[in-house]
Image (cartoon, grey):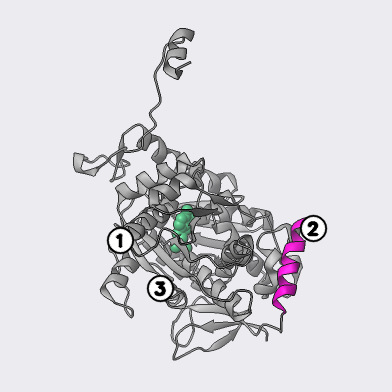
Amino acid sequence: MSAYLQCINKNCQEKFPINNKIYHCPKCDGLLDVNYDFPKLEAQELKNRFRERRSSFIPIDQSGVWRFRELIPFLNDERNIVTLFEGNTPVYDAPKSASYAGLKKLLLKHQGLNPTGSFKDNGMATGIAQAKSLGAKAVACASTGNTSASMAAYAARAGMLAAVFIPSGQIAYGKLSQSLDYGAKTLQIDGDFDLAMQLVLELSQESELYLLNSINPFRLEGQKTIAIELLEQCAWQVPDRIVVPGGNLGNSSAIGKALAECYQLGLIDRMPKMHIIQAEGANPLAQMWSKGERDKLLMVEKASTLATAIKIGNPVSWQKALRALDWCKGGGCHQVSEQEIADAKAIIGSDGIGSEPASAVTLAGIRNLVSSGIIDKEERVVAILTGNLLKDPDYTVNYHLDSLYQKSQTKIEIISQQDKILANFANRPVQVAAEKNTIKQVLGL
Ligand SMILES: *Cc1c(COP(=O)(O)O)cnc(C)c1O
């Protein structure tokens, strides 16, 4: 078997055939990887193939995930591929963001420009392909919004039932609208993400539902291509640092695995450092990192942040994320405040690049790392923007109207001024009479 499931626990490492519908190691309950006995592949030949496919008209070549299929070789039958032409996302030079962070130059890889507006599409492409290979008729996920939007779209394309479990009243409207429009059965659970996750995991073990959360290692195989494509866009010159937001910690895990495999296969000659950034109210890994705790998750009971995509207190992939930090030595996990996130988001916007609050933790984190001297201003740094601005327009509008509060206003509660997020970089709309001379004055014409 050239592709197999393997337990990540160092003292287990048991292997299982990939057609097993399991999400944990049946022996020790550890997380699973999809691993491969890679055939001998010539690095330059691979790079040429990846590049040539960019001018092909064949759907699997046009997909920014399946274009790299030699590095995710778990499918026996390519007819199980469903693609929305995910990936192929741009890397932007962002001068205002760079200067805000104190760097000479900063690159932003924008995964929010995927078909459903987040990096989840990279992973869903491979997750749905595996679901089809297994003959699944129904797929499920718990979601803070983007996973459900993505799964709903891919399930619709594949003709499968999608069951989405979302924490009631806690997801951004743009994301909810997608899951409804793509026809998913959308279950609003009275509880937070961590509870929804627990429920859907148990249901998938008891029924035919195939689970497509990032605990499913086939999803992480697709998310590897974010890093692979980034390396290609850097002409395979490894950046000094890659900075990613951390929620359930699947993405940082996948990026770490991709880098390790590219290194092992000789596609790159060194490993970059990786930094994972969390919101201070949803900071389990950042806490562990700063306290030197590596063996036991320091769960956050009631995760809280307006960056709902990373509002997770009990992240599934924390062990894989620590392993990734270990592979990408010299990085770490850090936290940023709600104020820092909001300001960083507005700065990214001023570069003409729209992102979700969760994506903006990267710039906020980089700024802190530069000012504390951990990152040098000359270093080549890439931040991964994970989601699109339009996912959560309420947040953005409230910031610019100077009415953004740390606590969400979905329930009637007294909001204190301490919870106010300052609109330090607000671009307020201007109320103006419908009169040309006044307008000219306002515009300075
Ligand atoms: C899912 C998501 C994250 C968090 O990614 P994890 O893999 O759960 O750490 C961050 N930002 C956005 C926009 C997301 O959709």
Q: What main secondary structure does the magenta stretch of the protein show?
A: helix
Segment tinted magenta in the rendering: 42-56
Q: CA distance from mark 3 to mark 1?
A: 15 Å
The residue where tag 1 is placed is: 372
* Mark linked to residue 56: 2
Residue 384 lies left or right of residue 232; in this view the side is left
Above or below 131: residue 85: above
* Sequence-first tag of 3 and 1: 3
| Residue 106, percent from left and from top | 48, 54
Bin the neighbour count of mark 1 within 10 Å (Cα to Cα): few under 14, some 14-19, many 20 and up.
Answer: few
* Sequence-first tag of 3 and 2: 2
Label 2 sits on what residue type?
Ser
* Mark linked to residue 82: none
Q: Are marks 1 and 2 in contact (CB under 8 Å)?
A: no
Instruction: Determine if the C-beta at disc 2 is less than 8 A from ligand 1.
Output: no
- Where disc 1 sits, the SS reads loop
Q: Nearer the viewer, residue 109 or 397?
A: 109
